[in-house]
Image (cartoon, rainbow, N blue to C red):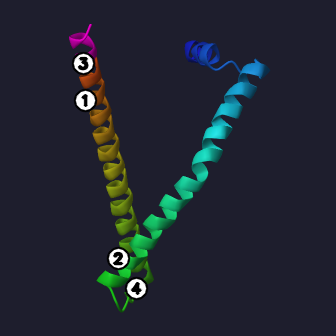
Amino acid sequence: MRGLFLWHNQFFDHHSEPTMKLKQKIVNAFVNSTHEWNMAMHNAIERKVHEGFKDTFPNGLKDPEETEKRIESMRTFYYQRMMNTASLLLTGSSLIIALMALVVAMVSIHYA
């Protein structure tokens, strides 16, 4: 256990205030800049979950527990779907950028 504690302190220097302040500023800036996007995504997913529930069960369900289970299941589905979509978009963008870099490299080699 002592080895783990020493390893932790080696990489996470809690006594170095200037370092922690810089790290904290970077993290705070990132969280603050993405907060609005995250809230917009969360609200859109929640809207889709409740729209989907109303479409599937127009009269609702009689059991509140069953209602909550269904909504939670739909919420999990939509969040998974959003993550898959985001991953595919990121992968596609990366592929396009890589292909553009390949074309630029081939052109520069050809004219070198």
Asked if the residue at tag 2 contacts the one at tag 3, i.e. Cβ–Cβ closer than 8 Å, the answer is no
Q: According to the image, label 2 marks what residue?
A: 52
- Judge depth for marks 3 and 4 and give the one in front: 3
Say if the magenta span includes residue 53. Answer: no
Asked if the residue at tag 1 contacts the one at tag 4, i.e. Cβ–Cβ closer than 8 Å, the answer is no
Q: According to the image, label 3 marks what residue?
A: 107
Q: Residues within 10 Å of mark 3 (few under 14, many from 20)?
A: few
Per the image, label 3 sits on a secondary structure element best described as helix
Q: According to the image, label 1 marks what residue?
A: 99
Which region is colored magenta?
Answer: 106-112
Q: Identify the amino acid type marked 4.
A: Asp
What's the CA distance linking mark 2 and mark 1? 39 Å
Marks 2 and 1, the one that precedes in the sequence: 2
What's the CA distance linking mark 4 and mark 1? 54 Å
View extreme (bottom): residue: 59
Displayed quadrant of residue 22:
top right
- Specify the principal SS of the magenta part: helix
Q: Which mark is residue 63?
A: 4
Q: Residue at 59% across / 55% down in the picture?
A: 36
